[in-house]
Image (spheres, rainbow, N blue to C red):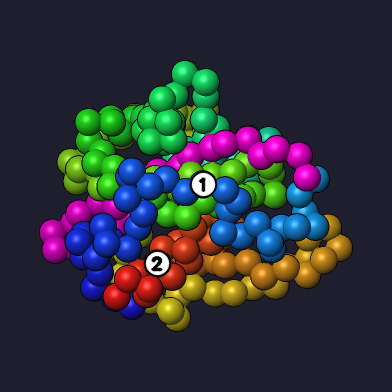
Amino acid sequence: MRDVDAEQLRRAVRDLADPPDGAGWNTADLADALDGGPLRPAAVLVPFVRRGDDLSVLFTRRADHLRNHAGQVSFPGGAIDPGDADAIAAALRETEEETGILPADVEPFGFLDGFDTVSGYHVFPVTGFVRSGYLLRMQEAEVDEVFEVPLDFLLAPENLRRERIDWRGKARTIYAYEWEGRRIWGATAAMLKNLIDRLERSA
């Protein structure tokens, strides 16, 4: 699937008035990995940037010195705080804190399906269009890099790999991309797989 435009993205995702509820779409795959306790709600922004007639997806690379997920590529986001009005507000707040991209430069337009993580979070992926002239003010304590990948590359079937890893003594399948020396994998790649599935169903 290639050459997806903004209107196709809008049709493929959940409406802003229809946020995901209940378990994540991947919960069954994590049945033996979660301890059964409540998952902490979190939100990420899945940011699409218009580049001429094309779209790209914006990612952050976490700082190498962090205790958790050091050096990993992710979407901007984090836990939903008590002061956040909702998942959208949390995603915009975290995006500004991590990258400096202002909420005024983001147009949220929908949700992907909820996603559960082995680290104990239930993630609300908020999709949004980011103004191409955004300014970066990275939080260097947390983020080493912000970069974009063409959406066409991420949607091309040959670029999304399925890999087998051993996690807690069990073989598991994960998704991964390689882009100019950067590895996009785990939860981030799985959310992109959810986007691909939703685009295919809406075509």
**In the rendered image, which residue does mark 2 sit on?**
198
Residue shown at the point (24%, 73%) measured from the top left: 3
Q: Is residue 85 above or below residue 28?
A: above
- Residue 196: give its label: none
Residue 29 % position (x, y): 69, 63
> Disc 1 or 2, which lies upstream in sequence?
1
Q: Is the magenta stretch mostly helix, strand or loop?
A: strand
Q: In this view, does 199 lie above or below 86?
A: below
Residue 86 percent coordinates (x, y): 42, 31
Residue at 52 percent across and 30 percent down: it is 80
Residue 95 magenta = no
Residue found at the far right of this picture:
169
Callout 1–callout 2 Cβ contact below 8 Å:
no
Q: Position of residue 202 (x, y in %)?
A: 32, 71
Residue extending farthest top: 83
Residue 142 is left or right of residue 117, and the answer is: left
Which residue is situated farthest in the bottom direction here?
Answer: 158
Extent of the magenta region? 36-60
The Cα atoms of the two marked residues, 1 and 2, are separated by 17 Å
Q: How crowded is mark 1: few (under 14 residues within 10 Å), some or many (20 or more)?
A: few
Name which residue type carries label 2. Arg
Q: What is the total number of numbered labels drawn onto the structure image?
A: 2
For the residue pair 114 and 65, the one nearer the viewer reads as: 114
Q: Is residue 72 visible?
A: no
What residue sits right under mark 1 in the picture?
21
Q: Position of residue 87 (x, y in %)?
A: 44, 35
Quick one: quadrant of the C terminus? bottom left
Q: What element carries label 2?
A: helix
The residue type indicated by label 1 comes to: Asp
The N terminus appears in which quarter of the rendering? bottom left
Q: Residue at x 58, y 53 (%)?
A: 24
